[in-house]
Image (tube, rainbow, N blue to C red):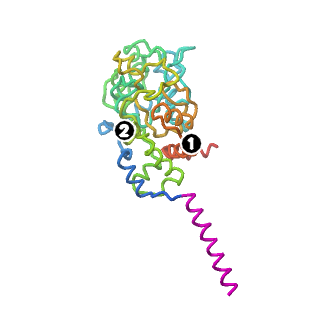
Amino acid sequence: MKNLISFVLLLTITSIIFISCGDSKPEIDRMALMTKAKAVFQQLPDKMPGSENDTQELIALGEKLYFDVRLSKENNQSCNTCHTIDNNGAGVDNLPTSPGSVEKTIGTRNSPTVFNAGFHFVQFWDGRSPDLKDQAKGPILNPIEMGMPDEKSVERKIGAIEEYQTMFKAAGIPLNYDNIAGAIAAFERTLITKDRFDMFLNGNPLALTDKEAQGLALFIDKGCTTCHTGALLGGNMFQKMGLLKPYADTTDKGKYDVTKVETDKYMFKVPSLRNIALTAPYFHDGKVPDLKSSVSVMSDIQLSQPLTEDETAKIVAFLESLSDIKLVKADKKQK
């Protein structure tokens, strides 16, 4: 009888401990979370708009041009210089703002990633270009970036290179500035990331860790999806930087500098969050050094939603799940 009482007592204590532990770590209903996520996010498509007309010859030409420093005045700067995709680059140079081709010049805005860029509704932080082709024309002639004086100078320089004469002929297009930009855009349309969040949206509830899933739930519940929605988790609208509280640096007026419309002051394209953990520093001025800080700033000035350390860490964990799988593996090998 005494042994029976002891056993019942031990079983009761064990049950209390088990229930208590279960209460401290509530389970995430992953299927419900998946349904909730699918209402605001989509998987990245396998192909970008416009790629249906891109031939292998055109893409190869664009890739060659993308890496060619001869597109710059001083023969020292290519598209890849600021939007690095070789050596495990995530499509950025990881600098606050980028040095120009001409010595002692430097840009005024952070270089956004070229990965998935063709899915954005407009290009540049202020949206001044409608698509990749138009965007590619800008930096080559920008006096701070690549510094070429005019389109004809670019055509003469590239046209004098025998390899390009052959490649343009193979692609079936004339060698002119418009087609130089078009070829670069064709190559950029191949730069699509693949990450575990897409696997989650595609029906794999275990593609995210517990911490990442909790971060996703917080990301939705705290209102981050006011701006970060769709396949890119951004890249599909403008928003005021400092919606509820002013951002620390009000020097850059954003879209206003293009339109001169008062309501466009401090309006910037909402950045995509795909690969965001690999593209520090953050924001249009590159002044926020890490992901944790950027989450804290955004929750404060855009949402007026203070976050605990634990909540911030979980949201950061979710954002890290948006990193391209191949880039993450390569980065781990390097370390």
User: Compared with residue 184, is residue 214 higher up or lower down, i.e. above or below?
Assistant: below
Asked whether 293 or 55 is in front, the reply is 293
Q: Nearer the viewer, mark 2 or mark 1?
A: 1
Q: Residues within 10 Å of mark 2 (few under 14, many from 20)?
A: few
Q: Position of residue 210 (x, y in %)?
A: 53, 54
150 up-or-down from 179: above or below: above
Numbered tag placed on residue 308 in the rendering: 1
Number of residues whose C-alpha sits closer than 10 Å to that of mark 1, classed few (under 14), some (14–19) or many (20 or more): few
Q: Which residue is at the far top? A: 149
- Three-letter amino acid code of the residue under disc 2: Gln
Please give the name of the residue rendered at 36% of the width and 32% of the height, measured from the top-left corner: 237
Quarter containing the C terminus: top right
Q: In the rendered structure, does residue 6 fall within the stretch colored magenta? A: yes
Quarter of the view holding residue 17: bottom right
- Check the image and name the residue furthest to the right: 2
Q: Secondary structure at mark 1?
A: loop
Q: Which residues are magenta?
A: 1-25
Q: Which residue is mark 2?
A: 56
Identity of the amino acid at label 1? Thr
Task: State the image coordinates of residue 223 (x, y, percent, origin top left).
Answer: 42, 41
Image quarter for residue 189? top left
173 and 140: which one is in front? 140
Q: Secondary structure at mark 2?
A: helix
Q: In the rendering, which numbered label is found on residue 168? A: none
User: Is residue 273 magenta-colored?
Assistant: no
Residue 193 in the image: state x and y as whole percent: 44, 42
Q: How far from the left and from the top, in percent, is residue 60?
A: 41, 34
| Outermost residue to the bottom | 1
Instruction: Give whichever of discs 2 and 1 has the lower sequence position.
Output: 2
Residue sitting at x 54%, y 29%: 93
Quarter occupied by residue 161: top left
Which part of the image, by quadrant, shows the N terminus? bottom right
